[in-house]
Amino acid sequence: MVQLDYAARLASLKSTLDDVLSVVDLDSLKARIATLSEQAGVPDLWDDPEAAQKVTSALSHAQSELARITAVQRRLDDLEVLVELVNAEEDEGQAAETAAEAESELAGVQATIDELEVQTLLNGEYDPRPAVVTIRAGAGGVDAADFAEMLLRMYLRWAEQHKYSVTVMDTSYAEEAGIKSATIEVDAPYAFGTLSVEAGTHRLVRMSPFNSAGKRQTSFAAVEVIPLLEESSVIEVPESDIRVDVFRSSGPGGQSVNTTDSAVRITHLPTGIVVSMQNEKSQIQNRAAALRVLQSRLLIQKREEEAAKKKELAGTITASWGDQIRSYVLAPYQMVKDLRSEYEVNNPSAVFDGDLDGFLSAGIRWRKRAVD
């Protein structure tokens, strides 16, 4: 007879889930959903589309979080029953089949609870906000532009796998292959807190497909991650501090995809920060989106300057994360390694196809240890 002894593993999962629930506070979450549902039910809600979007988005996020927690609670209870069925089953073949199902479900529940546990570590001021991710090609010529596009696809695939809402806000294509830069918005609960550990310089080592000599090439791409902030949180930007340029949206190779000057580029004159948007159909919408991202970047820059000043006044200097955070090696061996957490895998193809959760979890845990 097949016998499963999962008592210790189930007890550990229950304990971890209890810790998660103590941080999440289900009663507060349910109260928030009730409040947002009431606001969403107001007849004139959509008289102000922007405010309505915020309410419905917040409600959707809160409901999604609650559904995820209640689902894993139910799965954990069902798993206990499944184990009992295995142990009570007298038919060896049926017992083995049910045991395999129990093992698979246990692994799935473990992964979900691990994700929820990591989320409890995201307690920064802006961690719950949506994220704006910008990828820029660095040193390495055509290979760097191609690498930047690989990273863009990686983040899009990751968001797609999690069923997160993701929007490509702007893309600047390189002449030969790849992209010079791209900006995407990931609208999901704790998107900024989760993806913020991706910020820094990423390095690719491979046999270059653009090098006729077939030599190994090293190229770099930079990833910037900022939170998309509420309008009440942003810095006011005087019109005299910005220059607004309009141009036609374009696709690969410079092919026009828009016959009107709807794309917008905003330059913040005091800092030199440049934000481009071409996702929306109208110039007004692109201008509003670009201004919001600019304001978010300015606020984060201000907070970073204030934090640096405090450290300087305190007389302490702490090591920064460093520019290079991760290496993707395709030749002479296969490996992706995070240089901070030491987390590594030997399947770069899966990583570039969006399998990032291991790196994200390890990065968040590493950051928590570094802060503590």
Image: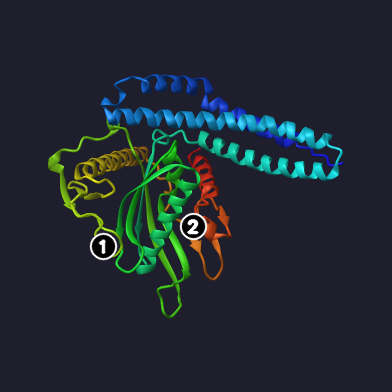
Q: Is residue 202 above or below residue 39?
A: below
Q: Is residue 142 above or below residue 160?
A: below
Q: Residues within 10 Å of mark 2 (few under 14, many from 20)?
A: some
Residue at horizontal 29 percent and vertical 67 percent from the top? 175
Q: Is residue 343 above or below residue 18?
A: below
Find residue 16 and report its horizontal and vertical position in percent.
Answer: 62, 32
Horizontal side of residue 244 vs 174, given as left or right = left
Find residue 231 and report its horizontal and vertical position in percent.
Answer: 28, 32
Find residue 153 and report its horizontal and vertical position in percent.
Answer: 43, 55
Tell me the residue that label 1 is attached to: 255
Residue at horizontal 60 percent and vertical 33 percent from the top? 72
**Front residue of 46 and 353:** 46
- Residue type at mark 2 is Phe
Q: Secondary structure at mark 1?
A: loop
- Residue type at mark 1 is Gln
Colour mapping used in the image: rainbow
Numbered circle sitting on residue 149: none
Q: Secondary structure at mark 2?
A: helix
**Front residue of 68 and 138:** 68
Find residue 42 and report its horizontal and vertical position in percent.
Answer: 34, 19
Horizontal side of residue 272 vs 202, given as left or right = left
Which is nearer the N-term, disc 2 or disc 1?
1
- Spot the residue most to the left: 240
Horizontal side of residue 81 vs 15, given as left or right = right
Q: Residues within 10 Å of mark 1 (few under 14, many from 20)?
A: few
Tell me the residue that label 2 is attached to: 352
